[in-house]
Image (spheres, rainbow, N blue to C red):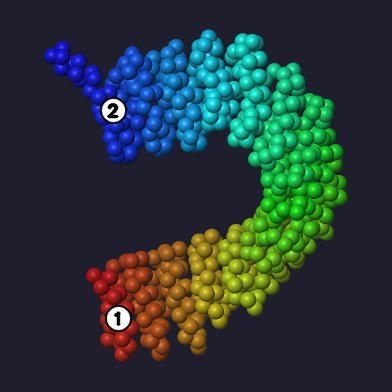
Amino acid sequence: MAASDGDDSLYPIAVLIDELRNEDVQLRLNSIKKLSTIALALGVERTRSELIPFLTDTIYDEDEVLLALAEQLGSFTPLVGGPEHVHCLLPPLESLATVEETVVRDKAVDSLRIIADQHSQSDLENYFVPLVKRLAAGDWFTSRTSACGLFSVCYKRVSTNVKTELRQNFRNLCADDTPMVRRAAAGKLGEFAKVVESDYLKSDLIQLFNLLAQDEQDSVRLLAVEASVSIASLLSTNDTEQLVMPTLRQAAEDKSWRVRYMVADKFTELQAAVGPEITKNDLVPAFQSLLKDCEAEVRAASAHKIKEFCQALSSDVREQIIMNNMLPCVKDLVADANQHVKSALASVIMGLSPILGKENTIEHLLPLFLIQLKDECPEVRLNIISNLDCVNEVIGIKQLSQSLLPAIVELAEDTKWRVRLAIIEYMPLLAGQLGVEFFDEKLNSLCMTWLVDHVFAIREAATQNLKKLVEKFGKDWAQQTVIPKVLQMSRDQNYLHRMTCLFCINLLAEPLGQDLTTKLMLPTIITMGSDPVANVRFNVAKTLQKLSTQLDSSTNQNHVKPLLEKLKADSDMDVQYYALEALEGLK
């Protein structure tokens, strides 16, 4: 028995070894994903002495297997005996942090960051810090890039001498010959700044920030911009002004558009970090120049931040800065040649209304909204219509109806059918923002007019629009407002309009429910079964086929089936075919 017990205890590791040597990648991947189960079966002693060394020796696999291994090891601490033994996980993760594939390295670094917190101070200094130093001094750039992400997690808990060494190592990485390493260092500079003592932040890290912000590679400079947000938030206003702002001013005018884009993208975070005084003196002019940038991507990124930037301005200067500095730029952007810029602006411009108040909105913003409502780019129009509610709250529905609604109505009656189509698609959104009474008064007749448009795509979209409106405003509204007009179309001289009536019934049956469909719609459908035009009759058969699932069985037997039997004997082949198909569905 003892021998068989011994064999059983070897079984998990033997199976793992077999599976990890299997040619099938999927099988190797599955075995790595079961590592925790195998470790549990082995126990903590043998996991430390056999499984971890085995894994360390076998790191030469496909990237997805290595990725799974790097992820698993991050949660392995309990399986090796808890925090006092956590350092035994470092060797396999160190190897993984040096592989060529970036995703695997990043995951290994994530796992190392997790287990760093689980080391005692002595273990950090004896095991973890030497690992960071080895990676930082590695021959290959892969290990040096991985090292950059590990400084911030161990710095706080080590002795003063070790801290000095770590700062020196980080300084070396910031000046590395390989751009990829400098990029990794720039990306981690902000989080390292948060753990470094204030004196060293000013004496060491600001130097590194300025060095990276003037790097020859724009991919390094733009990451330094990101670090500036963290650094500025840690400094006093005076220190920020002297130590960070000169570099930031340069970045906002950098020759590479990617760096300027990063400044625009991080602008409101910078604003929060530097405080109101520097914002007023430095950031406002910088923001103006970004809004006027020669690259569309930079203008679009800046335009996205307009509302947020204006909201965060100090209340005593907010209105003055918006009116004097921001509005002239906004007026230029409304007429920008690039649709992404106009779309970005349209998504936030309405948010300026609550900040500027009623009078300024009516005088300065409404004309801009009108221009954007008529823009040829559908996304710009949609962004304006989507945000009408915040303007409505400021200027009131009366003013809104006098200024913007005529423009919407004009678009709804545009000679280009694609423009009409776009407005139809926004109608349910508008209806929700304006409310049922206002909608009935101003826009309801438009929705009904679209049902008899001479373009089929408009008629089809109008039926879909009706369905959404009924879902929004409810059955009672539909009964009073929509159904009488739809049913009236069944007696129209134009057979296309009679067919539209059937299409509406098809779509409205579901939101109206069984009772209203049976009471109001079915009699009209039965009457239309005798229509002189065959196209209308076979659409009656198709409508009945669809509605039969929503009607009760007695209605189907007493009303639907007799009409379908009649249509089955119709003189037109198509009518017969669809009637027969509908009857099949009734069985």
Q: Measuring from the top left, give residue 509's x and y in whole percent.
A: 42, 68
CA distance for labels 2 and 1: 64 Å
Amino acid on which disc 1 is placed: Tyr
Which is nearer the eye, 323 or 545?
323
Residue 16 is labelled as: 2
Which quarter shows the C terminus? bottom left
Disc 1: which residue: 577
Which is nearer the eye, 407 or 56?
56
Q: Measuring from the top left, give residue 349's x and y in whole percent.
A: 72, 54
Q: Kindly indicate the quadrant of the structure image that contains residue 88.
A: top left
Q: Is residue 521 left or right of residue 444?
A: left
Which quarter shows the N terminus? top left
Q: Measuring from the top left, give residue 165's x and y in whole percent.
A: 63, 15
The answer to whether one can see residue 229 in this image is no
Amino acid on which disc 2 is placed: Leu
| Residue in the picture at 46% in, 20% down | 90
